[in-house]
Image (cartoon, grey):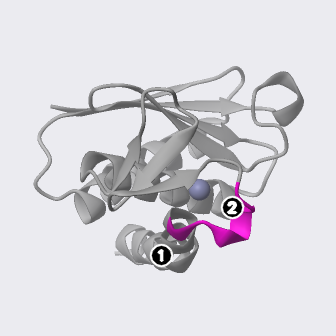
Amino acid sequence: MISISIEGNDVDEYLEDCLLDAAYFFCTELLPKHKKLEVDIIVEIDRESKLEGYTGFVEKVGRHQYEIYINKEQPLGTCIISLAHEFIHIKQYEKGELKMLEEQQKLLWFGKPYEYDRAYDDIPWEDECFAKENELYYKWLVKIDK
Ligand SMILES: [Zn+2]
């Protein structure tokens, strides 16, 4: 079962609807054959959360279970692009392309170990997100326009 929920205080209803619709859409696009996935989208204000200046981030919290944090102090389109970005990471985890090692200090990308604190623009799994996040967002815009 694919289950996606949204959490957060004073989340604008329109933003919530868009995030939920986009999340299911990204799931179908990225993991079309997936049967089991649980994603909690936590919509927050940066200073009150663990965002630390990021537009969003994702945490794997269990088998097929994730929490996505989205900074709501950004325009709607940017929120959806952040969501697309984090869903690409979920795809990477679910397909085993990206694996977190037990001690969580190292990650495996297609079997190759990486230190976690490499510069942000020098991480292959981030390259995939930055290359695909806008395309996914535009696909969603086209879908809701129909
Ligand atoms: Zn990322």
Q: Earlier in the sequence, mark 1 or mark 2?
A: 2
Start-end of magenta stretch: 118-124
Quadrant where the N terminus sits is: top left
Could you tell me the amino acid type at mark 2?
Thr
Please say if 48 is above or below 13.
above
| Residue under numbered circle 1 | 132
What count of labels does the image hold? Answer: 2
| Residue 23 rendering spot, x and y as whole percentages | 40, 49
| Residue 79 rendering spot, x and y as whole percentages | 65, 54
Q: Secondary structure at mark 1?
A: helix
| Residue under numbered circle 2 | 78
Magenta span includes 52: no
Could you tell me the amino acid type at mark 1?
Lys
Residue pictured at 82% horizontal, 45% vertical? 73
Please say if 142 is above or below 76.
below
Residue in front for this viewpoint, 69 or 110: 110
Q: Secondary structure at mark 2?
A: helix
Residue pictured at 33% horizontal, 54% vertical? 91
Residue in front for this viewpoint, 10 or 118: 118
Residue in front for this viewpoint, 14 or 51: 51
Say whether mark 1 is within 8 Å of ligand 1.
Answer: no
Please say if 24 is above or below 45.
below
93 left or right of 124 in image = left
| Residue 28 rendering spot, x and y as whole percentages | 24, 58
Q: CA distance from mark 1 to mark 2?
A: 14 Å
Residue pictured at 36% horizontal, 55% vertical? 92
